[in-house]
Image (cartoon, rainbow, N blue to C red):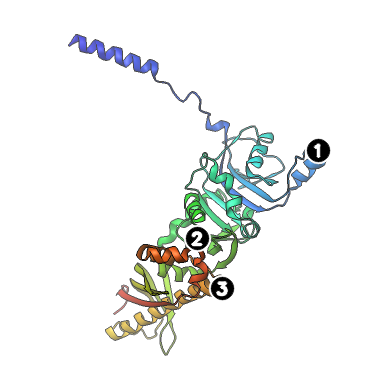
Amino acid sequence: MNRIRKKLTILSTALLVFTSGCWSSKEIEDLSVYVGLGLDVAEESKFEQDINKQGGHYPKNNVFTATVQIVPRVGGKQENQNSSSGSSGGQTFLNERLTGDSLIQIFRQFALRRDRPLIGHHLKVIVVSQELSKKYSLEQLLDFILRDNDIRPSSLVLVSRGRALDALSSKEPGEIPAFYLRGLVNNAYRTNKILPPVSLAKLDGKMQSGSSFLLQNVLTADGEHKFSGAGVYKGKTKKWIGALNQVDLQGLSWITGEAKGGALKSYAPKKGYTIVYEIKSTKSKIVPKVHGDDISFHVKVESEGQLMEDWSSPEIPATEDYIDELEAKFADAAKEQMQQVMNKMQHTYRVEVAGFGEQLRIKYPKVWKKVKKNWDETFSQIPVTYDVKMKITDYGSSTD
């Protein structure tokens, strides 16, 4: 027994000797943790202009301006003239900007201005302005980000209607815009106007596949932000070519089966008063059909939900005939939304961003090989039919 104890003691001592801590690590207090990154059309700040006049310029073209949103350390010093801060009293976040033609070079330039180096392990959101992504492909703009092992592939990628800088700014006390934007995607269970989040890793996969894709669009007004619609990116160029609005995203969610929550409004037959259906569940199936060289698709949608608003006055009792009538109206409304987004995909932008090609690839791989190279153009000529069924399972506590 004593021999066993002696061996255990020696082993424990050896473990203590050979176990080391993170001797090569850096304390987080000695680093600049950035949580948001914005990319805009080049616009040198006054700080950069003044520094350049004093000989602080280095060889570069002014292609874009990068905004880095930093979470400052507690008790940290005030920033220089090129920084903008939120919640001025508590300095919740700092936005620093530099202009150039290489993102990594811009990041290294920060080492000339900050005593603490940037660290991207906690990057939450990347916002690219619509105007910049019209000019340059996302593959070019995000090349360094995709190569950098410090940056998490789970970072959310968004497109801004205005400046990315504005999307990463806020007047709300205590708010960090990068966290706020990241949190909005969690509300998808309440509305079908939010796209499934596109992470850096997912975006890379879409770009590598050559297929067209969407990015959630964010609008900014008076320091406040709102998700509204999506930017459309052409698979061949990886550039912004147009936008879908909120109703388009609703229609897209029916097609893809992503409509897990949200409200569908319509108007009752004859009298035209407001009726609203709240989505509880949705099932969708895209069925490809091939006959010789002819391709077509049939979309089947089934949804269950509640009748949450009924402006009939006096209130109409929820008889079977009345409910059937409302279900048909809601089905027509959903179908109309689907047809609206399909019209934009096939005729306005001539892209396919709803997963039709993937279903064709799964069921008819040989056919897919023939058409995949010019799939966007091919899809614009393909007929699509619909079968939509809505079932009201609950009429609310006040309905007779």
Say whether residue 367 is visible.
yes
Q: Which image quadrant is residue 383 in?
A: bottom left
Q: Is residue 118 above or below residue 232?
A: above
Q: Identify residue for label 3.
A: 348
Q: Amino acid at mark 2?
A: Ser
Q: Which residue is mark 2?
A: 211
Q: Is residue 394 visible?
A: no
Residue furthest to the bottom in view is: 270
- Disc 1 marks a residue whose amino acid type is Gly
Please give the name of the residue rendered at 75% of the width and 41% of the height, measured from the top-left corner.
59
The answer to whether the residue labelled 3 contacts the one labelled 1, judged by CB atoms less than 8 Å apart, is: no
Alpha carbon distance from label 3 to label 1: 49 Å
The residues tagged by marks 3 and 2 sit, at their Cα atoms, a distance apart of 17 Å
Q: Residue at x 79, y 43 (%)?
A: 50
Query: What is the crowding at mark 3: few (fewer than 14 residues within 10 Å), some, or many (at least 20)?
Result: few
Task: State the image quarter where residue 366 is shown.
Answer: bottom left
- Residue under numbered circle 1: 55
| x and y percentages locating residue 168 in the rendered image | 60, 52
| Inter-mark Cα distance, 2 to 1 | 45 Å
Q: Quadrant of the C terminus?
A: bottom left
Residue 164 lies, in percent from the top left, at 62, 54
The structure residue drawn at horizontal position 30% and vertical position 82%, both measured from the top left corner, is: 318
Q: Residues within 10 Å of mark 2 (few under 14, many from 20)?
A: many
